[in-house]
Amino acid sequence: MAKDSRSNGKLWSLSELGCPVHSLEKCFFSPREFQLSPGPRLLCSPGNPLASAGTSSSHLKGQAMEARGITRGRHQLLSLLCSIWLWVSTAELSPPTPTEQSREGPPLQFRLAGYPRKHNEGRIEVFYNQEWGTICDDDFTLANAHVFCRHLGFVAATGWTHSAKYGKGTGRIWLDNLSCGGNEKSVVDCRSRGWGNSDCSHEEDAGVICKDERIAGFVSSNVIETEQNQVEELRLRPVVSHAKRPLPITEGIVEVRYKNRWAQVCNENWSSRNSRVVCGMLGFPAEKKVNQNFYRLSSQRQALHFRLHSVSCLGDEVHLSLCAFEFYRGNATGACQGGMPAVVGCVPGPLFATGDAQKKKRRRQQRPQQGQTRIRLKGGARAGEGRVEVLRGNEWGTICDDRWNLMSASVVCRELGFGSAKEALTGARMGQGMGPIHMNEVQCTGSEKSLWSCPHKNITEEGCKHSEDAGVRCNVPYMAYETTIRLSGGRSQFEGRVEVALGAGSNSTPGWGLVCGESWGNLEATVVCRQLGLGFASQGLQETWYWDASNVTEMVLSGVKCAGHEMALSHCQHHNTVTCQKTGTRFAAGVICSETASDLLLHAPLVQETAYIEDRPLHMLYCAAEENCLSSSARNANWPYGHRRLLRFSSQIHNNGRADFRPKAGRHSWVWHECHGHYHSMDIFTHYDLLTPNGTKVAEGHKASFCLEDTECQEDVGKRYECANFGEQGITVGCWDLYRHDIDCQWIDITDVRAGNYILQVVINPRHEVAESDFTNNGMKCNCKYDGHRIWVHNCHIGDALSEEASRRFEQYPGQLNNQVV
């Protein structure tokens, strides 16, 4: 920028002063106003023409000299200085913006591309310098997306995507490190590294999601470009009576959306492979044969509008747009002569099956049992998404994301009873796992029945970390669960009082009622957030007096108890008749949802490596007794004489989720413990128990959160929480909190335990006070053998790390007849 001494310190852009970066011929100045300072500065004013620094001497002779008598030599010198200043300023002071580089050329054009997508979302592409190119996602923001969406004729953006969610583009990457305020009329008014100046690859192509509302009177040549083979939306329209039963719709006429209406697909050369692709898009793992006779009669009595014909799929495509087909052009009144609309029947997965027998199968599938399958999804907020984990040698592990693609992801989805894959996620987008990484460079063709049938490499031969864990988002059937529940009174769509639908009232509109807040917690909130598609639960609330914004006052549901895996609140247990002690609206249940959540789990090997027995004198345990860290018999001990026998070990608690773990209570309610000199931010943070093999508890310990902090972190993660001096408490994503074995209460008091074989069990966040993406991995178990003097701890593992069969063997010692050492 240039600073004009006559403008009271105002900074002017070069274009405002007549000095555009790309055209020095337009720069005019007076020599008395030209100066170079230690921070190069150029002052330009109207008055005198100046030739560009690159102009030949013969051309200079033809230029008119200014009236004040500047000589040709001085003119050339000033031209050179102007050129130097412009080069320095553009290189150091103000990086080139699209504004100066594009306004004189033809107008920019914009389009959305990629698959699968809707008409208002996609990879953003720009036509500049006679070439289509993409935008890098570095520093991309929602403000950038607003500008692009307005270019495309939409009023605003609702989101943006990174890492080529809609597929990798081709050609140039036109803009990198783009920075818009959000109110710019054109992207050329935003700052960037300059057109074509990028260090990105197409794996970093940015996309936008625009609000589906057009700008009034929007007229532009920049129409939304869609590929000719693009099918935006597809459905099955039920016709026969059994297909009209409650959702999901598994059979009907295939229809595609075209110009705000639904059009049919001609069944000319239609095959089962086509049906497989359609079913996959709609969330079903497989297709089935359909009786065509009724549909043939039905189609003869209806006015049909055909859009597609000659569809030819291989069967492994994740979207119909990837198949070969043709559009009917112009007047298609006589289309599909001799044919009929394509009809498809699909087989629902266990989670979406109907009928009593199928519902039982669904309930079995929903239970967190590991022995039924060799593959599972973890860490996802919605059905059909998560980190992919596979079972090998009775131990669950993850998959490295090298060469991970939609074909392999679709095999996973179909194997688990969902449809084809919407996204193949890389870079631990669904959180990091722990334990082994079983597979790498998986290369499926899409037709395999199981992921284990796909070619792959063993990770022992490759270098891969859990930061590269692969994940999936699968197509799932539409169940309309979100229509039977809503949130009211919250500050955003992610929070509010929970209201459930009662069915149609007298005016054909559904009635609504409240849920009793008694015993309502994070598990129930997790189901509500999943049902509404709002991600994870951040908090379940038992009082919602500050959200009294609805005229709904009747309490219609009570005693709700969820396991956390259900897809709808109606799948949870609840009272047959409403029983609620506090029936006022202020005691109605509420939730706060979040797109991300933390995920705590223990490093099991450390417990096994550090376990030992210590006989600690009573006179050293006064503080521990005050904090209730000893067994009840310690109250009757002969203080300060004698000792207590303690099983001690270290625990390392990792946060492998996608959000920081923060205590539920704010710092204003933390409790100061004078004895140990620290604040407790949670009443109970961990349970330590010693159990018999049949589950009977023989000793217990508990440790409140002395202070939650980042003891250590991964290499690329910085510490954020430190509880010294009343600092903030929590565990950052990618960090862990280490409680050493020599800290008070980091033990189990086994003074009264007899010799025998036991199970050491550690549970983090046992009351689910803080929401997490996965509670099933919060527990850890070890085998223990205690002979009255020494203890052996072995086979330590996270609660969901082993197969069901291995877990049964873990709890059964060969040849053991009782719990005593013989």
Image (spheres, rainbow, N blue to C red):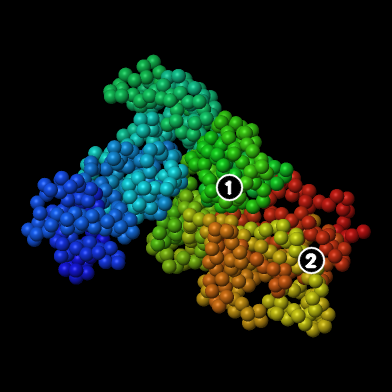
The disc at residue 488 is none
Residue sitting at 40 percent across and 54 percent down?
Answer: 139
Q: Residue furthest right?
A: 822
Spot occupied by residue 455 in the image (x, y as percentages of width and height): 62, 33
Is 262 left or right of 452, judged from the image as shown?
left
Spot occupied by residue 536 in the image (x, y as percentages of width and height): 51, 55
As measured in the structure, the alpha-carbon distance from the residue carrying label 1 to the one carrying label 2 is: 35 Å
Q: Residue furthest left?
A: 67
Quadrant of res 490: bottom left
Residue sitting at 29 percent across and 37 percent down?
Answer: 130
Q: Residues within 10 Å of mark 1 (few under 14, many from 20)?
A: many
Q: Would residue 252 be visible to someone looking at this image?
A: yes
Q: Residue furthest top?
A: 338
Residue receiving disc 1: 469
Q: Would residue 398 be visible to someone looking at this image?
A: no
Q: Residues within 10 Å of mark 2 (few under 14, many from 20)?
A: some
Spot occupied by residue 270 in the image (x, y as percentages of width and height): 46, 22
In this view, the residue in front, 89 or 192, is: 89
Looking at the picture, which amino acid does disc 2 mark?
Tyr
Residue sitting at 30 percent across and 65 percent down?
Answer: 39
In this view, the residue in front, 605 or 659, is: 605
